[in-house]
Amino acid sequence: MGLELVTGLLFLFLTVFGLVGNISVFVIYMCRFGGGTDKKSIQFILMHVIFTNIVMLLSKGLPRTIAAFGLKNFLSDITCKIIVYMSRVARGFSICTSSLLTIVQVIIISPKASGLYRFKPRSVWHIFPLLVFFWIVNSLISINLLYIHYVPMNTSQLSQSDNYCFFIQGKMKKENDIPFTFMVLRDVLFQGIMGSTSGYMVLFLLKHHQRVLYLQNAKLLYTTPEIKAAKSVLLLMLCFLFFYWTDCFISLHSNFSLENYSIILYIQ
């Protein structure tokens, strides 16, 4: 009971803290939405990323918090399916949108003489169809979760898919093959795009920094905005990749393992 209380309080703190933070930033972006085309495009994408974070916290954080306090079987079959489905869709949409954000940033900072500049979004309506497309694709990839049967948590012969929802292992494997393949392809594709565009931005900023040093004939400008921006891009990309692939490994291990590793799920 002591461990459940501690983990419950921890999950509650992280969930509430995340919700308050994301909602606050979302409201700030809503109030400041405006300015130039570049600013609007970036803000519009960021607002969708924040909205996705809120959906993931509500669909994953709150049920985990309730389950951590020891309340079992509090979800019905339909509710469990919807929560797990929304969590999976939001997770995939977050990856796609984050990759789109790096692409738009690369296009915006590219010189006018480059070929990328012609793809520069002229308004937020050029971004909106892509976001709708991402929602549709991720919704279709995860549609199989709505047809997997939920069973009570006190059934010992069944394996764990989440710490608040259990699914029949054999049926889950059978229905998860094709969607799982599409999920892997999606993740590899958009992770590759994110890594490539982030690397391009770092190289571009470093080259710009060298040109500034040459023009100003300076030798000790190591803390210029270009260097700070390049470090920020690298740090954000590495953090995203690290946490994402760690979550992937834990999810795969828990889904396909017949043993119940509650500590690993708590870490996740």
Image (cartoon, helix red, strand yellow):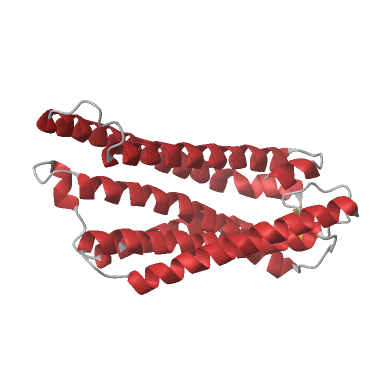
Picture quadrant of residue 210 = top left
Q: Judge whether 2 appears above or below 249 on screen.
A: below
Picture quadrant of residue 131 = bottom left
Residue at 76%, 53% in the rendered image: 163
Q: How many marks?
A: 0
Residue at 28%, 35% in the rendered image: 200
Determine the residue located farthest toward the bottom in the rendered image.
31
Q: Quadrant of the C terminus?
A: top right
Q: Position of residue 105 (x, y in %)?
A: 28, 49
Q: Position of residue 34 (x, y in %)?
A: 27, 70
Residue at 23%, 59% in the rendered image: 38
Q: Judge whether 30 appears above or below 1 on screen.
A: below
Residue at 74%, 47% in the rendered image: 266
* Depth check, front residue: 224 or 48: 224
Picture quadrant of residue 246 = top right
Q: Position of residue 59 (x, y in %)?
A: 63, 63
Looking at the image, residue 140 sits to the left or right of residue 232; the answer is right
* Depth check, front residue: 206 or 228: 228
Determine the residue located farthest toward the right in the rendered image.
1
* Depth check, front residue: 244 or 254: 244
Q: Judge whether 63 appears above or below 241 on screen.
A: below
* Depth check, front residue: 259 or 123: 123
Looking at the image, residue 236 sits to the left or right of residue 116; the answer is right
Residue 164 in sight in this render: no
